[in-house]
Each structure stands twice: as C-alpha cells, then as structure tokens.
Image: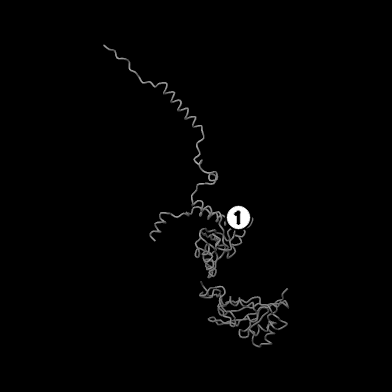
Amino acid sequence: MEVASPKKYAYPSEEIDRTEGQVIASLKAGSREALPDPDAWLEEGLRRNILLTTVDAILDWGRRSSLWPVICFPACCAFELIAAEGPRFDLSRFGMEILRASPRQADLMITAGTLTWKMAPNVRRIYNQMAEPKWVIAMGACGISGGIFASSYSVVPGYNKIVPVDVYVPGCPPRPEALIYGIQMLQKKIARTPVVPDLPKFLKKGKEA
Amino acid sequence: MTVALSGKKVAAQIEEKFPGSVVESSEGSLVIKGESLLAVAAFLRDTPELGFDYLNYITAVDYYSHFEIVYQLTSLGHNHTMMFKTRCYRRESPVMPSVVGLWQGADFQEREIYDLMGIKFEGHPNMKRIFLWEGFEGYPLRKDYLS
C-alpha cells in the first residue's frame, strides 16, 4: 500500500519577502522627498500675485473701506461730525476722511441735522445725484424722527420720509464715538451685501423681457 | 453805552409835529397810529437831533384782539436807541405800510412777518413768502395756529 506523501504547503519564498521589503523601503524613501508643487508650471510673477476669494468679498471690501461722505449738514449735528473728522477722533482711520462737495463723487450721506420741508427737495436731489451704490446714516434725534421739532409745522419728521436710511445713530447730538460706531455698523452691513447677481435668474429675466 | 430814549419825550416831539398820531406813551414804550406810521418814521429818521438811521429789527406780536408791530431803532451818530409800536386791528386781512423805503434792512423782516404772521406790508417791492413754501396754509406764529 502506497503511503501518501506529506502535504506540501506553499510557504512564501524568501524572494517574495525581499521584494516586499524593497518596495516598502522605496516608498519610505519617496515619502521623505518634498511634495511636487502644483503651481510649478506657473510663472514667477503669477505665482506671487494670485489669491483666491469671492467677487462679493472683494467688492464689499472695496466699498466699505473707502466710504466718502457727501456734504449735507443742515444743522448743529454737523459740529459733532466735524469733531469726528478732526484729529482727536480721526475718522480717517477708517478710510472715510474725504468729504465730497459733489454728491457724484460720494457714496455715503450722513444727515447731520434737522431737516425742514423747505430743504427737503434739495436733500432728495443730493441723494438722487449720488452714484450707486449709496448709503444713508440718519444722525441725531432730528435725523431719526424730527427730535424735539417732530410736531413742528416746518420740520420733516425723520429723514426716512425723504430718503432710505441704512443706519440710525441716536443722540442729541451723538458723540463722535457714536457716529464712528454707526459707520462701523454700516461697514458690517455692507460686508454682508451680495453684489453679484444670481446669474441664472438674471438671464431668465432677460429672456422673459 | 447806547442810551435808550424816553418814549414820553419822543412822543412829545412827535405830537408837536403830527398832532393826534400818538396812541399812548410811557418811559419804555410808544404806540403810534398805523395811518401816520410812515410820516412819523420818516420824521424819526430825518430829524437831526433824533437821527435814527439804523433799524435794528421789526417784529410782530399777536394779542388775539390785534397785532402789534414793533420797531427798534438806533442812531449810530448820537448813540441812542428807541422802540415804537403800531397796532393793526383787521385780523382777517391785516395791512401795514412798509418802511423799506426808509430802512433797507426792513426788506426780509417784513417778508418774514408776512410769511409767519400774515400781515401784508403795502409798498414793499417784493412782498412774497420767505421761509415757507407756496401753498402752505395758515400763519404759524399766530396764537390761534394749531398744526
């Protein structure tokens, strides 16, 4: 009777182990090298000058960082605004020290003072002459609601009856710090404003029209 | 310092020149009839010893029964001053003679009184509104004005 030979097991050969060891060693060696730069194909000038951001972010940054107020100071709050512009409170820290005598070069209207009905058409005209985008800060009690003159026969009870107001700064008059805080509030508001239109919607509207 | 002339003394001078033109007078005030206002004003300005060449202001007061128009005059040469008033009883259509011909400074102030008190000044070269807009109803400085 023939005796069955003992079962042969397929043990991995030393050759395979050696190959595996070499692969691991080469991977390990490769991992020590610096990763290849994906921008390597770019020119030196381009590589230093390209940043990624959104159009909204960059436009809003530009808009809020150089707010130029138009000169529209009908009454006494103007002196607090002048103080805010001056060296002690130094509004120019926030990029808005340049008062524009022409509304066409301005984008912020700080309504510093009581508005009479006789003056109202002129304020509306100044607002209409300002180029888009434009914002309005109602400064002081008179600017917000007419203040102590609210029931007078000749005073407009609040600038928002004449022009759209973005930020209200209360006080009679507000301190320069309050005005600066109000302007910073406006800057935060501008930072959240979407600038780029919803393009598909925009195009659809164009087709319908 | 500027001396305030006695209303009584000036009244005596006026009464001498224009009999019956003074309604009442005291140390501090002098009321003149409306009809003789222009003649008296010219007298006050042109008489050398009075010489009121400067009109400080005109204003008007509402007493319900009548309006009182107040004139404050100063003589720059003599350095003295005085105040006189006239009364206007026609509440529905009050009319006063204008003194713009005598003192140019009355121009805007008479327009202001016309605008806010509703008193018309006859002889004013440009009698129209100065503060309020065309179409505004009522006279805001009258006592019976309620907005």
Task: Check the image and report above or below for A153 versus B68.
Answer: above
Q: Characterize the local packing of mark 1: few (<14), some (14-19) or many (20 or more) Cα atoms within 10 angstroms.
A: some
Dot 1 lies on which element? helix
Query: Which residue is painted at 41% across and 56% down in the image?
Result: A203
Q: How many marks?
A: 1
Amino acid on which disc 1 is placed: Ser
In x, y percent, where is residue A157?
A: 51, 65
Q: Furthest-left residue in view?
A: A1
Image mark 1: chain: A
Task: Check the image and report above or below for A21 versus A206.
Answer: above
In x, y percent, where is residue A35?
A: 50, 36
The one nearer the camera, A1 or B27, is A1
- The N terminus of chain A - image quarter: top left
Task: Check the image and report above or below for B91 versus A47.
Answer: below
In x, y percent, where is residue A184?
A: 55, 54
- Circle 1 sits on which residue? A92
- In screen coordinates, is B32 left or right of A3? right
In x, y percent, where is residue B75?
A: 70, 78
Query: Which residue is painted at 43% across and 54% down in the image?
Result: A199
- The C terminus of chain A - image quarter: bottom left
- In screen coordinates, is B67 left or right of B77? left
Task: Check the image and report above or below for B64 versus A187.
Answer: below
The one nearer the camera, A37 or A174, is A37
